[in-house]
Image (cartoon, grey):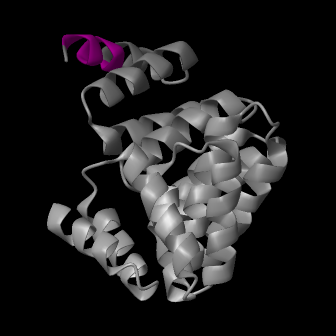
Amino acid sequence: EDALAMCKRLLFLNIRNVEMVKEKVFLLVELSWFEEAVEACECLLDASEVRSIEGLILYEDILEKAEMFTKAISICDEILGLDDEYVDILRRKADMLAQRNEIDGAIRVYQQLIRALDDCDAENIVHAFMQSGKLFERSKRKDEALRSYEKALQIDKHLSQAWHRRGQILAERRRFNEAAISFENCLQLQPLDVSALYNKGVALGQLGRHAEALECYMRC
C-alpha cells in the first residue's frame, strides 16, 4: 500500500507517466482492488498512442477478475481484431460466454479455437471439445455432445468425465453394451465414482446381466 501511495503521488506530478501507471495497475491487482485497477488500466490505454495487444490483455484479465464480463468479452473481440487466432483469448472468451449461458456463441468460439490450434496443443483442444460437449448437452443436442466427447477421448483416453458423460448419452440411446463399457472405462480411472458404478449397474441390468449389475449396486 505504501508503494501504491508513492505511485499516486508521482502520477499527480505527471499523469501520463505510462510506466508508473503500469506499476499502479500491478499493485492494485496484487491488493485485489480490481475496480480501481480497471480505472487505472483504462488510463494506461488512454495514455498510450496505440492500444497494444499487451495492454489489452492486461485490461481483459483485470476485467475478468472484477467480474465485468460483458466488457471483458468486448476487449477479447478487440484483441481478436488484431490477431484472430490468439488462442488464450479465444479460450477466455469462450469460457466467459459459457459461464453466461450464451451457448451458441460459446460453441462457435470453441470451434474457432479448435481450428486455430495445432495438434500438439492437446490441453486446449481437449478443453474445447469437453466444454462444447457440455454445452451441446445443455441445449439437448446429445448427438453432437457425444461426438465432442469422443473427439476428446481420441486425444486423451484418461478423461474419466468424458467416459462417464459418453456412457450416459449411450444409455439414453439404449446402447447399453457400449454404455457399460464406457462406465467401466470411467471406473478404471476413478474406482470410487459411485455414480459411474450405479450407472454401469443399470446398463448391465438392461442387458440381462443381473448378477454383475447387483455386484455394482453392492459396491455403491
Mark yes or no: residue 75 visible: no
Q: Residue at x 41, y 27 (%)?
A: 25
Task: Judge by depth and name the residue closer to the eye, 104 or 54.
Answer: 104
Query: Residue 52: image x %, image y %?
Result: 72, 31
> Can you say whether 147 is above or below 193 in the image?
below
The quadrant the C terminus occupies is bottom left
Q: Which range is magenta?
A: 2-8
Q: Residue at x 45, y 51 (%)?
A: 160
Where is residue 117, by image quadrant? top right
- Predominant SS of the magenta segment: helix
Q: Answer with left or right where residue 113 lies relative to residue 183.
A: right
> Can you say whether 173 is above or below 200 in the image?
below
Query: Residue 178: image x %, image y %?
Result: 58, 71
> Can you say whether 86 is above or below 11 in the image?
below
Query: Residue 13: image x %, image y %?
Result: 42, 15
Q: Answer with left or right where residue 91 lies relative to residue 71.
A: right
Q: Residue at x 34, y 64 (%)?
A: 196
Task: Judge by depth and name the residue closer to the eye, 155 or 48.
Answer: 155
Task: Judge by depth and name the residue closer to the eye, 153 or 68.
Answer: 153
Mark yes or no: residue 109 visible: yes
Query: Residue 140: image x %, image y %?
Result: 56, 87
